[in-house]
Image (spheres, rainbow, N blue to C red):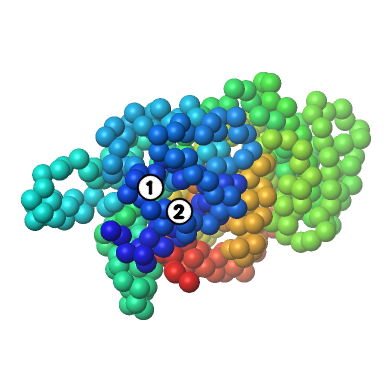
Amino acid sequence: MIPRSVRQLIAAEVSAVSRYADRVIDLQPFPHDRGEVFGDIECPLKQTAPRGSPPPDLSGETDRRTVLLLNGHFNHETDIQKYLTDLKPFLSRTSRLVAVSYNPYLYLAYLAKQSLQGRHDRSMIFLTRDNLHHLAKVSGYEVVRIRPVGYLPNDTPLAREANSLCPVVPGIRWLGVANVIVLRPIIAEISHPSVSVIVPARNEKGNILPLLERVSMPDGCPFEVIFVEGHSTDGTGDEIRRVMTQHAWRFPVRAFRQSGKGKNDAVLAGFREARHQVLAVLDADMTVPPEMLGRFVEAYTRGLGDFIHGNRLMYPMEPEAMQPLNWLGNKGFAKLLSFVLDTPMDDALCGTKLFPRHDWPRLERWIADFGDRDPFGDFNFLFFAAETGLGIVDIPIRYLARMYGETNILRFSHGWELLKMVLHGFRNVAMGKRLP
């Protein structure tokens, strides 16, 4: 029997995903499951699908996120691959499975207990991390993350500190009592979604017309471009209005002026005006070729992930595209975020990204809880995508040098703000959840 303090830690880890979902369903719980973990999970709507009944049909959901709790299924189902494969037709790409599984290192303790009790039941399953990834792959899923929880079972000050610190200690982190696994069904779209391209622009007058001439999408993908002008001093706002009125574009072009300051504020203002199914962000500096957005849409359409993110650091970049100190900073932040979010990434600060519009209100709620500390918004997106299990996919980009204007980045002051956000994330995301 799992101690109550460990059950609460498991529920807190599940809640990192379910808190921002529309509902969580306790899927076909086993008879020995008394529902204590499920009872502690946070979600606006909680339901149970009893064992013996068919799974709820979520396949028609397009903008609603439902989390299915599989508590102990990976330890007790006799054929996990068949279970996952049979479940998948009932899911949509917005569904997420969150499975609670005993640590495989407990297998020897399980055998010892069986021997002491004179029992020879070996039906319980203990899956390693490699087992989980292989099972997910052959069943049509992706393991978005695996987080261990519960190191000391009693609720004492020492145990609380250990349960918080151990998840970030290499080696020791995998010795928790249980693992909380988030799985994403890999489901492709029938056709390309419509896309709203948000272009924050401050002092980018010379880039407006070339951007509109070059931005493109796959055939059959409707899209719009929304400029959000940021109090420019070079006539960017006038240039946007000029190219909108003097040129006939094959796609809608709209423009707004942000009321606040900074890129993050501009992007969020653009989201509020967006009309299409998917939101994309494209910087106006043209350092990322506008034609590349089509690759982001293709990756999303194929179901490879729900958060498509650019990677500028894979390919050699043009001379003068990025200063050496900026390159080192980008690499350093990427390594830090990879550790904090337990998600591999090479570029944490690429401004080009794409994700479904129905997740925008969830992102707003997440920012309200986490705190808006990000001057650019890039970290907010990555933290949210990793924590809620969207599935992050990198698109490699050849980074280009600016042809017009100067960067709006204040290297040291903005870098300090980002470092503080990483430290805040380390305490609130990477470290184990703390009980109230």
Q: For the residue marked with disc 1, what is the amino acid?
A: Asn
For residue 319, say whether it is visible. Answer: no
The residue that appears at 34% across and 28% down in the rendered structure is 82
Q: Position of residue 152 (x, y in %)?
A: 29, 68
Residue picked out by circle 1: 71
Sooner in the amino-acid sequence: mark 2 or mark 1 = 2
Residue picked out by circle 2: 38
Quarter location, residue 284: top right
Label of residue 12 in the image? none
Q: Position of residue 261 (x, y in %)?
A: 76, 61
Q: Position of residue 144 (x, y in %)?
A: 43, 44
Q: Secondary structure at mark 1?
A: strand
Q: Are marks 2 and 1 in contact (CB under 8 Å)?
A: yes
For residue 370, say whether it is visible. Answer: yes
Q: Secondary structure at mark 2?
A: helix
User: In the picture shown, does residue 219 fall above or below 360?
Assistant: above
Toward the viewer: 328 or 75? 75
Image quadrant occupied by the N terminus: bottom left
Q: Does residue 91 appear to the left or right of 216 in the view shown?
A: left
Quarter location, residue 357: top right
Toward the viewer: 334 or 22? 22
Q: Position of residue 395 (x, y in %)?
A: 52, 38
Outermost residue, bottom direction?
157
Quarter location, residue 250: top right
Toward the viewer: 56 or 409? 56
Q: Does residue 316 appear to the left or right of 150 in the view shown?
A: right
Q: Does residue 331 appear to the left or right of 108 in the view shown?
A: right
Q: For the residue marked with disc 2, what is the amino acid?
A: Phe
